[in-house]
Image: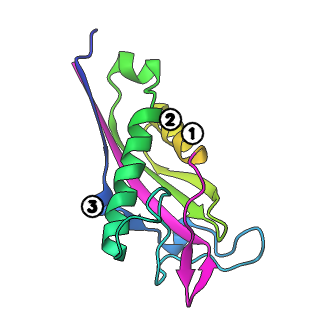
Amino acid sequence: MKYTSTIITLLFTTICFAQSDHCPEVDAYGDKIYTIVEEMPRFPGCEDIGSTDVEKKKCAEKKMLEYMYKKLKVPTIARENGIDGLVVISFVVEKDGCITHIKKLRGPNELTVMYEELICNMPTWIPGKHKGQPVPVCFRIPFRIHLSE
């Protein structure tokens, strides 16, 4: 089979902040893991762009998509078998910006591994802040992949 197009979408408009049943309550250091904070973590690369949080968020989303498109490698088995669908991954952005606690919540295993690797290898994020202090924050992000013939 020959695939003429691959459509991969990171659903930024539906990025979900994780509910407590999908994330640990505390990190390895004993710090509480938050789900919503005053200043949410962001993908890096936009620290000096724009003056508002909205501008920085839009830029960070764009940078994350660029990262995904550049690094994403659809597994051969998924491509050959036309495996597609929705994958939901949760992870924690620690107070130093490192990514930990990566966990599949939904999706075919052939695609889940691909997204777990992408998230695991992400650069250090800009950490979230609560009351002016960096804190660990849990995310849940849905990804949709469609392999068309």
> Which residues are drawn in magenta?
122-149
Residue drawn at x 50%, y 76% is: 35
Residue drawn at x 45%, y 61% is: 140
Q: In the rendered structure, are the residues bearing label 2 and label 3 in contact, judged by CB atoms less than 8 Å apart?
A: no
Rendered position, 99 above or below 119: below
Which type of secondary structure does the marked residue at label 2 adopt? helix
Rendered position, 16 above or below 26: above
Residue drawn at x 45%, y 18% is: 76
Q: Of callouts 3 and 1, which one flags the residue occurring earlier in the amino acid sequence?
A: 3
Residue with the most extreme top position: 1
Amino acid type at image mark 1:
Glu
Instruction: Kindly identify which residue carries mark 1.
Output: 117
Asked whether, in this view, residue 136 is left or right of residue 140, the answer is right
Instruction: Kindly identify which residue carries mark 2.
Output: 114
- Label 2 neighbour load within 10 Å: few <14, some 14-19, many 20+: some
Residue 13: assigned label:
3
